[in-house]
Image: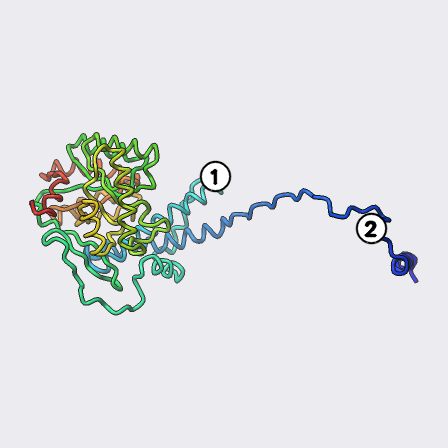
Amino acid sequence: MHKPFAFLVSLLSIASFNPVSAQDLQLPKEPASVEVPAANPPAVDVIGMIAEHDEVNSALKLYSDIAFVSPQGSPQFLEASASGQYLRARLQSLNRAIARELGEPYRGDMRDRGQVSFRVSEELNDAFGFYGGTVAREERGVPIKEGYCKINYVKNNVPFLVQSDSFLKKGEVILTFDDGPGPLTEEVSAAMKAANAPSVFFVLGSKLGTAGKERVKKAAADGHEIAVHGYWHANEAGKPFTVFSTAEIVKQLGGVSASITGAAGRKPGFFRPPYGIITPEAVRALDSELGLVPVGWTIDTLDWSTKNPEELFNKTVALIAQRGKGIVLMHDIHDQSRIASKRLVKWLADNGYTVVSPERMTKAYRGE
């Protein structure tokens, strides 16, 4: 037998027939506390985030293309616009996360764009419920105010606020900006004031911290209307108001309204549902309980779909020229929108258009 192995057997034999107590060995009755080092946080999957970024970017490209070739207000347009806004927010979140890890911005893989993966399609369906084959409602259009707005059930019965601008004359425009306040809001607000273009800023309650309230205060002082958009857009995961009950929507927007009142010094009079998705019941409740006038849009600039301010400006003026008037939707959180909006107000003035007071919408809705 090998000597070390024989020695080990000998020790085991002694232990078997001569047991030793813990007292004999003077062992503690309870184990001593041992400091366990903290576990390292799990490594961030940067490669996975980059792959997801490019997957979302590809889908965003496709929905941008669909939105631009579809008639505004059509089911195809509404689906593409809502999907595109959702995907743009997802892309911005991924951009920030990747930049934190790489230490520099990530611009993405620009090849093979314009496809929607099964995973992205499932995520969009979970957010909006566009697909699923639900039996269609008998009421495809629910009137809210004749000549002003209605709710259309499209794309698997998703309720969209459809705005009319019949109360505007040819050459009249109302300018609106969503999803602020943000670092660009003050510059946009000042530019609109300088151009004598009173606008509506639909703000998010989640952005009304100290800096946000100061931005809202300045925009109000510039003569603009500060209006309600939501607390999130419309919940924290980016899903629309249809995930909430009517009572929950009223409570959420009531809180945002109170925050705006405290910051701007006057109570807001308008609200715009994120993506334009909301039920008739919720619209009526927000009017009766909070006194808020619903506002959609008749010209969607799709400023989420491009980062090129020249492209955005050219498409926006083409849409306005084609319609001849309208309620224009932009976002004061995008740099391309900041640049294009400043050019837009000059173009409007040079081409005989008038930016009218948002109060025109209140009068149209109230029948005044």
Q: Where in the figure is residue 23, as x and y percent of width and height?
A: 84, 49
Asked if 17 appears above or below 342 in the picture, the reply is: below
Q: Which of pointers 1 and 2 indicates the residue nearer the eye?
A: 2
Near-viewer residue (317 or 234) = 234
Give the secondary structure at mark 2: loop
The answer to which quarter of the image holds residue 212 is: top left
Q: Where in the figure is residue 40, as x and y percent of width and height?
A: 59, 45
Q: Where in the figure is residue 221, as x and y percent of width and height?
A: 21, 30
Please state which amino acid type lies under the numbered disc 1: Gly
Q: CA distance from mark 1 to mark 2?
A: 57 Å
Give the secondary structure at mark 1: loop
- Image side of residue 350 versus residue 135, left or right: left
The answer to which quarter of the image holds residue 159 is: bottom left
Where does label 1 land, which residue? 103
- Image side of residue 207 versus residue 315, left or right: right
Residue contact at pointers 1 and 2, CB within 8 angstroms:
no
Q: Residues within 10 Å of mark 2 (few under 14, many from 20)?
A: few
Near-viewer residue (351 or 209) = 209
Image quarter hosting the N terminus: bottom right
Where does label 2 land, which residue? 22
- At a point 55% along the width and 48% down the height, the residue shown is 42
- At a point 13% along the width and 42% down the height, the residue shown is 173
- At a point 38% along the width and 50% down the height, the residue shown is 110
Image quarter hosting the C terminus: top left
First in sequence: mark 1 vs mark 2:
2
Please state which amino acid type lies under the numbered disc 2: Ala
Q: Where in the figure is residue 227, as x and y percent of width and height?
A: 23, 41
Near-viewer residue (255 or 322) = 255
